[in-house]
Image (tube, rainbow, N blue to C red):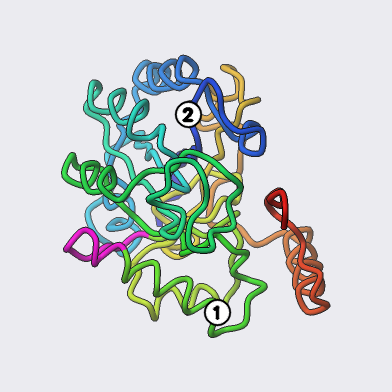
Amino acid sequence: MNETPVPVFLYHSVSVAPPTWIAPFTVGPRAFAEQLDLLADSGRVVVPLQRLVAALYGGPPLPPRSAVLTFDDGFADFHSTVAPLLVARGLPATLYVTTDAMGGPGSPVRGSLFPPARMLTWRQIEELDALGVEIGGHTRTHPQLDTLPRRRAQEEIGGCKAALEDALGHPVHSFAYPHGYSSGLVRRLVREAGWSSAAAVRFGFSSAADEPLRIARLMVRADTDREQFRSWTRDSGAPVAPFAEGMRTTAWRAYRRLRADLYRPYAALPRQSGT
């Protein structure tokens, strides 16, 4: 199998004034544009996620020096800031949407676990879909899937897919785990729900030998400097998937599960005021 590094970049918000809770995971518009330019200067070819997924299932090989752009959650700045920069450069991307957070002007709706933030509306998601952005799923409410009972996890995974397909009028294929958290059971539930791929985090490069339901990504954060990003474009600075789950990851899952079993779940997101 081909283990040539493929950076699958993970972004969240791209904004100059994000809410404080998402600020550490936010990239400014100027920095984001510079990173796109660094990708181009490095000779990387940004390909649709589905090209990578096809290669993972034994399809046509990827172009040399491929890269993939992905965005989690569904912040409103994807429509206002990110999409114009991508369109101007002719770059494909996948946007993973948390469906129960969509549709509100500045606060969570229908039980989303997100604190207040400006999220995309369903109309904007339809516009992005028509523009050629791949719309994928990121659960209904953004829970830690690997700590949920089976039925609740099924509702989050399958309900998200149903909501997106109902809104867009066509099948959706790509899923991303909230917080990057999954388990063997969660990955089976994702497959049973009909998703053909699922993105994790893993802080590593993907490759044509990666796992289709645990695609490794490199998270771009507010503190990701130019040299760090440049090193990723040069195939350095992170391991290449597939690689075994580390002991710290396994122990962290066990700790979070124990907290959930004791009805004192670990708060992966800041608690909303008044709750």
Q: Position of residue 216 (x, y in %)?
A: 51, 51
Q: What residue type is labelled 1?
A: Arg
Residue 8 makes an appearance in the image? no
Identify whether 266 is placed above or below 67.
below
**172 sits to left or right of 141:** left
- SS for tag 2? strand
Q: Which of marks 2 and 1 is nearer the N terminus?
A: 2
**The N terminus - image quarter:** bottom left
Residue 251 makes an appearance in the image? yes
Q: Residue 265 lies in magenta, yes or no?
A: no
Q: Which of 14 and 211 is in front in this view?
A: 14
Residue drawn 61% across the image and 26% down it? 224
The magenta stretch is 164-174
For label 1, the residue is: 152
- SS for tag 1? helix
**The C terminus - image quarter:** bottom right
**Residue most toward the bottom?**
151
Q: Where is residue 10 in the image (x, y as percent from the top left)?
A: 49, 41
Residue drawn 27% across the image and 42% down it? 124
For label 2, the residue is: 14
